[in-house]
Each structure stands twice: as C-alpha cells, then as structure tokens.
C-alpha cells in the first residue's frame, strides 16, 4: 500500500504539538534559572540536571520524598479500597434482585457527576468538626468512594454469563465463594483498568488536598510542587519544573507498561 | 379452589421471603460502599444544601432562607465568572470535537502506518495532572521563559507581552485542546472501529472516497458518542480550575475568573462558606441538568441489560 504522505505530515504536526510541552519540560530540568531565562530550545549547557535533582531531593530535608510517599499512599490505597468496594457493590447489582435496586442505581448515577466543588466545601466543614482537617484520612476517605467505578463495575459484572453463576450454585457454592472464586477471576482485567483509572485520578487530584491539607509534610506531589519557593518566598522555576518532571514520571511509566489496560472511560475526571 | 388460593399465598410468601433474603445478602455486599457513599457524597451535599440557607459572619451562623441565592443572582461577579466556561463551551469544545473526529478518521487511515503510535502520543497529555499541565504551559507562555519570545522579538514585536489577561483565554484554549483532544479522539476512534465494516465496503465498491465514506456513512454512527462527549466537556468547562489557578501564579487574575475559582476564593480567601456552598449547589444543579441525557441513556441501558455506556 502507498504511504499516505500528506496524512503522515498532518499527523506529525499534531504530534509535535502534543509532544512539545513534554520536550520543553525535559530540557527544562537540565537548566538553572538563568539558563531558563535564555529561552533556548536545547538542553542547558552546562547540563544542570543532576544539580536540579540534588536540589529537589535535599529540599527541606527530603520533603520531596514525603510528597512522593504521600502520593503513592493516597493513590495506591485509595484506588485499592475504591475498587474493592465498587467490585462488591457491582456484584450485588449483578446477582440479587433486592429492594430499592432501581432507586439506588439512579442515585449512584445521579451522584456520579456531582462536581467536587459542591462536595469538597461541605466535606471541609465536616472534617473540621471531626478534627480530621490536615490528616491523611481527610484525603483518603473521600478517595475511597469512586462512584463512577461502581457504575463501570456493574457493567463488568453484567458481562459475566449467567450460566457460570448457575453452575456454581448447583454445585452448592455459597455466595461469598461465588464472588471470590467464580466472579473475581473474570473481572481481573476490568479491575486493573479501573485501578489505573482511579489511581491516576487520585494522583492527579489537586482540589481536595488543596482544601483539606495545609501542612506541607502531608501534601501529595501535585500540591507540594506548587509550594516550592526560596527562603524569600519567590518561586524557583527550575525546581518546580524538575519536581513536575518527577511527578509525571511514575504516571508515564505506568501508562507505557500497562498500555493495554488503559482503556479510557468517559467520565469527568477533574 | 381453597388449595389453589393457599398455594398461591404460600408461593407469594416464599417469593417475598426469597427477595428479602436476596436483599439482605445484597446489602451486605453493598454495605462498605453505601457507608462511604452516604458519608462522603450524599451527606456533604445535604450539608451544603443546609449551609446554603444560612447567613454567616465568622463562626456565627443564622438561618436566612433563600437569601444567599437571591444575592448570588444579583452578584455580577458570579455571572462574570461564567465568561471562561462559556468561551470554552462555544469555541474550545466544538473545535476539539471536530478535530478529534478528523484525527479519529486519520487513525483509521493510518492503521498500517503507525496509527497506534500516534494514538499513544496524542493520548499522553491526558495522563498527566492538570496542575502540571498548568505549570508547564504557563512557563512556556511566560515572557521570561517562553521559547516564542525570541521569535516575537525577531519579528519586531518585542514590546508585545505574551502572558496578559486578554491573551489568557486563548492560552487556556490551547492548553485545554492540548490536554483533551487526544483522549477525545481515542474515544471517538473506539466507536469508529465498532461500526460494521459492511457499510463502508459497499460504499467503497460504489466508488466513494475515504472522506466521503467518513462523513456520509460513518459520521451518523458517531452522533451518540459526540453528544456524550459534548456533555462531559460542557461539565468540565463549568468546573475548570487547575489550569487557570496555576496561570494565576504568573498573571494577576480576579477572584472570579472561573466559577470554581470564585467558589474557592469566596470560601477560603473571604471566609464566606455558606455563600460558597450556595454557589456550589447551583453548579451541582447545572451539572445535573447537563448530565440528564447521559443518565437517562445509562438507566435505559442497565434496565434492558445492555452492558456498557461506551466502548
């Protein structure tokens, strides 16, 4: 087949637009502030990457690593719990004809798209009364509920054929056994996809920690890196860029390694 | 006769108790979710609704009915905050949906020439946090660091600043297009490849060109996914916060640059929590109205047993 030259050219131009900020960020990590001000599109000469990395790693006695650990805790534990409870809820919808099923489904859908700006403020008031403000629980607890993944879990469970459940039931398996032994293995691919979706969602969530966390030691990366200043309180551009680079690095690695599990699901993620 | 009625009754009873038993089991499985759903989502909304009916000064609060809402509707700053969402909704979203559709067609055309690689590259911006997007782009456009600055200087525009308030909405346009076009194209592409091949093959035999097939035959199939995407993006446009918040570190922005920023600033800069809660409720209501179409479709799909909202 003939290679479509014009189309390739168009695709390359688009690709340049999508790649450019990544490129600029990467060369930005090799520069100090005065090199950044030179506005060149080439890596800094001399290359200051290692100096920037050292400065970030030693910034305020390793605060960066604290942010990194927080991000992994919030996103990892948050996504894990969210997926488990969503999986259980999805199973209930798949297997049982229970009172209030339709109503509950409509409620779940209706609340799936409530903007965070409507819930986060009252959550702040609630957490303030419970003395949870500025604790890690204040980020974790809301992260445990990912309403949209319940909806997706219901659809995943619906794809498991009825016969599998019936056969297991005839063999005398009880409901818990069916959930773990029969159902879950069928759902693993869906669970991985959802885990990634929720993990990235929490990792990238800025607004919730902005509202409920004020001590820098408990901030996740996305919030922490916006607070980097020199002792006079001025922004330090090279350090902000270098830490941004390390904020997205785990995401890019995850995305590249687990590409086939990244199935975009429509939802409002921000 | 009696026996039959008895049987009937017993059957109903047994069916009832069967449903009761199923309900008990179901709610055991639902318990962890329901507990968190109620405390972290439903209760806060109810609390927000209650707060919106209160006046507040410092820690003192008192009931004022719908006074907050009356004030909001007469608050020009509230209405002005919708300028950016409106701009995004009328310019960015249509532009993005159109280019994403073209890109999705091109993915198909390039299937044997590295289409997968392009899909991967275009999707990348969507995987990174909005705040990092905001940092990188705001630096790229800042006059002290922008690689475009030397170009402008060379062309004789050395006096023209890049990062200014009037330019900001266009910068925001470029940023949001950058962040979401690849994702949108991917979603459209997923529906595109689900269209039965028979349609395009027949047209091809009749001598239709690639673009004729794309626009005349395939586009109608994309109607639903485009409507859904439009709604999600409309919701996203109302809620835009991270990118302007980051840009606001380099340019002075008014507290009401977007509705979400106005809510945040009202609550945390001015301490008007109940007023902010009322605005949050209005935003939630707007979102809900926008999403009704999707909700209706999803409920229909669930009740007819069809499994998924989208690819």
Image (tube, coloured by chain):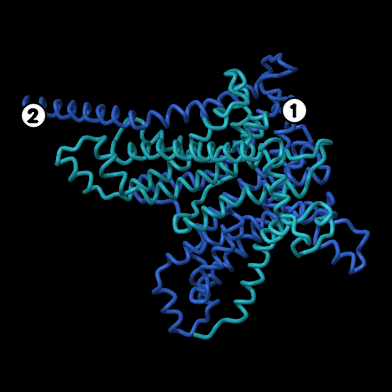
Q: Name the secondary structure under disc 1.
A: helix
Image position of B211 with respect to B80: above or below = below
* Image location of residue B207, percent across then percent down: 48, 85
Q: Quadrant of the C terminus of chain A?
A: top right
Using the image, tell me which numbered label, if any, was put on residue B71: 1
| Of residues A63 and B110, the one drawn nearer to the viewer in this rendering | A63
Q: Which chain is cyan?
A: A
Image position of B64 with respect to B175: above or below = above
In the displayed structure image, the side of residue A97 where residue B263 appears, left or right:
right
* Image location of residue B200, percent across then percent down: 44, 75
User: Considering only order in the chain, which callout, 2 or 1, is on the residue closer to the N terminus?
Assistant: 2
Task: Report the label total.
Answer: 2
Q: Which residue is mark 2?
A: B4
What residue lies at 61% left-to-right and 36% top-to-bottom?
Answer: A66
What residue lies at 41% left-to-right and 79% top-to-bottom?
Answer: B202
Q: Which chain is blue?
A: B
């Amino acid at each position: 087949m003939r290679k479509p030259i014009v189309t390739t050219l168009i695709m390359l131009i688009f690709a340049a637009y999508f790649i450019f900020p990544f490129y600029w960020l990467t060369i930005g990590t090799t520069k100090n502030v005065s090199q950044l001000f030179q506005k060149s599109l080439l890596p800094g000469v001399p290359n200051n990457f290692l100096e920037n990395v050292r400065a970030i790693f030693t910034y305020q006695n390793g605060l960066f690593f604290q942010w990194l650990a927080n991000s992994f805790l919030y996103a990892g534990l948050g996504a894990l719990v969210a997926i488990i409870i969503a999986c259980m809820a999805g199973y209930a919808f798949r297997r049982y004809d229970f009172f209030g099923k339709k109503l509950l489904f409509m409620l779940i859908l209706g609340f799936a798209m409530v903007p965070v700006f409507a819930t986060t403020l009252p959550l702040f008031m609630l957490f303030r009364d419970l003395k949870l403000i500025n604790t890690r629980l204040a980020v974790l607890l809301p992260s445990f509920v990912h309403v949209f993944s319940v909806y997706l879990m219901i659809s995943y469970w619906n794809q498991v054929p009825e016969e599998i459940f019936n056969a297991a039931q005839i063999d005398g398996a009880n409901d818990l056994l069916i959930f773990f032994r029969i159902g879950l293995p069928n759902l693993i691919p869906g669970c991985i996809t959802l885990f990634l979706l929720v993990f990235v969602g929490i990792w990238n969530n800025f607004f919730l920690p902005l509202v409920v966390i004020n001590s820098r030691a408990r901030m996740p990366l996305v919030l922490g890196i916006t607070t980097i200043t020199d002792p006079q309180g001025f922004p330090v551009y090279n350090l902000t860029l270098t830490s941004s680079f390390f904020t997205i690095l785990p995401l890019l690695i995850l995305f590249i390694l687990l590409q086939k599990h990244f199935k975009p699901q429509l939802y409002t993620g921000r | 006769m009696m026996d039959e009625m008895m049987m009937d009754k017993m059957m109903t009873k047994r069916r009832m108790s069967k449903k009761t038993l199923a309900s008990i089991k179901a709610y055991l499985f639902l318990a962890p979710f329901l507990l968190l759903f109620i405390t972290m989502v439903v209760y806060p909304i109810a609390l927000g609704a209650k707060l919106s009916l209160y006046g507040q000064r410092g820690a003192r609060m008192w009931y004022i009915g719908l006074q907050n809402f009356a004030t909001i509707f007469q608050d020009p700053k509230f209405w002005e905050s919708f300028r950016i969402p409106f701009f995004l909704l009328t310019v960015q979203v249509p532009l993005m949906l159109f280019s994403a559709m073209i890109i999705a067609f091109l993915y198909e055309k390039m299937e044997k020439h590295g289409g997968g690689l392009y899909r991967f590259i275009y999707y990348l911006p969507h995987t990174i946090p909005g705040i990092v997007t905001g940092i990188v782009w705001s630096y790229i456009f800042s006059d002290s660091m922008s690689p475009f600055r030397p170009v402008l200087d060379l062309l004789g525009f050395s006096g023209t600043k890049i990062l200014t308030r009037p330019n900001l909405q266009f910068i925001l346009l470029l940023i949001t297009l950058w962040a979401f076009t690849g994702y949108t194209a991917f979603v459209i592409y997923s529906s595109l490849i689900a269209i039965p091949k028979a349609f395009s093959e027949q047209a091809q035999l009749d001598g239709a060109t690639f673009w004729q097939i794309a626009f005349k035959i395939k586009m109608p199939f994309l109607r639903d996914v485009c409507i859904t995407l439009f709604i999600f993006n409309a919701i996203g446009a109302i809620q835009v916060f991270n990118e302007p918040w980051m840009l606001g570190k380099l340019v002075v922005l008014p507290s009401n640059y977007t509705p979400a920023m106005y809510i945040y600033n009202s609550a945390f800069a001015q301490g008007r929590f109940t007023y902010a809660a009322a605005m949050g409720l209005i935003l939630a209501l707007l979102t809900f109205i926008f999403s009704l179409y999707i909700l209706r479709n999803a409920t229909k799909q669930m009740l007819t047993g069809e499994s998924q909202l989208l690819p």
